[in-house]
């Protein structure tokens, strides 16, 4: 994407990688994460960006597009759809559905429990990644387990790494979580009731960007070079064997863009635009002024 002439920015979500990792649960609510995205757009001197998000990154990007449409030229979400607001928060729905079964998001609610299990041996990430992939025999290890278990005990352990997960990849993720821990990432799951209460328009407003342009899939976003002058790239930076992505600056016609993934996105102070916004290893320092949120 960078070689095609786009300015691309791949981010570490707060709590991950090189980004800040505030301790408070509420520091990971949706309003704070949207503010981080807006802070990165500001940090690059742009008014708008195309947002591309995967997994938790998808609702971060889509909610930013819905609640801050004037700052988002287009949006693409991968793996997680834009959901309508229900009568209760998502976590309350999970409590009802899984009242007699194990469900990982419910297991994440008690502070310190999942963190202790995962941090005891961070390399067990391989079980987590494999069980959620298409190579696992089924999703029963996630969805059909009795209540009262732990996260890892029911997950299959692959005999070897699948083709899509190299030892170098796993080493990179393990190093990141060994350095920063799991509290920040898991805190995101502890904000579902807070988001439901504090953002009543989340899931009500349409997730459209640019004052009414339609939501687009990643493939169309990447082709619309002239109409949408920025997209996101997460290319590895292989200089010196370093797999971290890099920020690539391009001509002024290229706008800033952000990518948000559940392990690769942006961080900042509480409800602010980041003291330390890490772009896959390249830090961008900003002051502590807050970014307005809806």
Image (cartoon, rainbow, N blue to C red):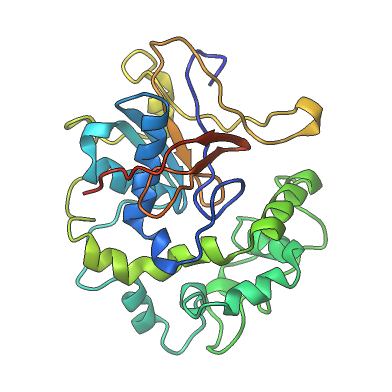
Q: Residue 77, located in which quarter of the rendered image?
A: top left
Provide residue 269's location: percent of width, then percent of height. Answer: 43, 51
Name the residue nearer the viewer: 122 or 86. Answer: 122
Above or below residue 121? Residue 78 is above
**Residue 25 located left or right of residue 126:** left
Q: Please name whichever residue, 32 or 128, is drawn nearer the observer in this view of the structure.
A: 32
Residue 136 appearing in the image? no
- Apparent side of residue 35 relative to residue 180 in the rendered image (left or right): left
Residue 128, how many percent across, how many down? 65, 64
Q: Is residue 49 above or below residue 147?
A: above
From where the camera sits, is residue 21 visible? Answer: yes
Residue depicted at x 38% and y 76%: 94
| Residue plotted at (35% across, 52% down) | 271
The tally of labels here is: 0
- The percent position of residue 256, horizontal first and vertical second, equals 41, 25
Q: Is 140 left, or right, of 187 in this rendering?
A: right
Seen at 37% across and 47% down, the residue is: 272
Q: Position of residue 103 (x, y in %)?
A: 49, 77
Q: Residue at x 31, y 16 (%)?
A: 227
- 36 vs 168, left or right, is left
In which quarter of the view is residue 274 placed? top left
């Amino acid at each position: 994407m960078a070689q095609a002439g786009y300015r691309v920015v791949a981010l570490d979500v707060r709590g991950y990688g090189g980004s800040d990792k505030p301790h408070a649960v509420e520091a990971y609510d949706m309003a704070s994460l949207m503010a981080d995205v807006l802070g990165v757009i500001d940090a690059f001197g742009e008014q708008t960006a195309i947002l591309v998000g995967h997994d938790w990154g998808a609702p971060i990007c889509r909610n930013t597009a819905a609640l801050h449409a004037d700052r988002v030229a287009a949006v693409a979400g991968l793996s997680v759809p834009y959901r309508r607001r229900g009568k209760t928060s998502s976590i309350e729905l999970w409590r009802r559905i899984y009242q007699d079964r194990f469900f990982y998001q419910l297991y994440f609610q008690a502070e310190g429990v999942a963190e202790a299990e995962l941090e005891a041996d961070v390399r067990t990430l391989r079980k987590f990644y494999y069980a959620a992939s298409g190579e696992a025999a089924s999703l029963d290890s996630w969805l059909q387990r009795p209540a009262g278990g732990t996260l890892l005990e029911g997950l299959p352990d692959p005999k070897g790494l699948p083709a899509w997960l190299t030892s170098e990849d796993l080493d990179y993720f393990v190093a990141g979580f060994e350095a920063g821990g799991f509290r920040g990432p898991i805190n995101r799951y502890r904000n579902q009731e807070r988001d439901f209460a504090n953002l009543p328009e989340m899931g009500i407003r349409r997730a459209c960007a640019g004052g009414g342009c339609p939501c687009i899939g990643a493939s169309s976003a990447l082709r619309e070079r002239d109409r949408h002058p920025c997209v996101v790239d997460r290319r590895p930076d292989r200089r010196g064997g370093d797999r971290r992505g890099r920020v690539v600056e391009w001509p002024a016609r290229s706008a800033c863009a952000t990518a948000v993934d559940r392990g690769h996105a942006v961080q900042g102070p509480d409800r602010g635009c980041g003291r330390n916004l890490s772009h896959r290893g390249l830090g961008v320092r900003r002051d502590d002024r807050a970014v307005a949120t809806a």
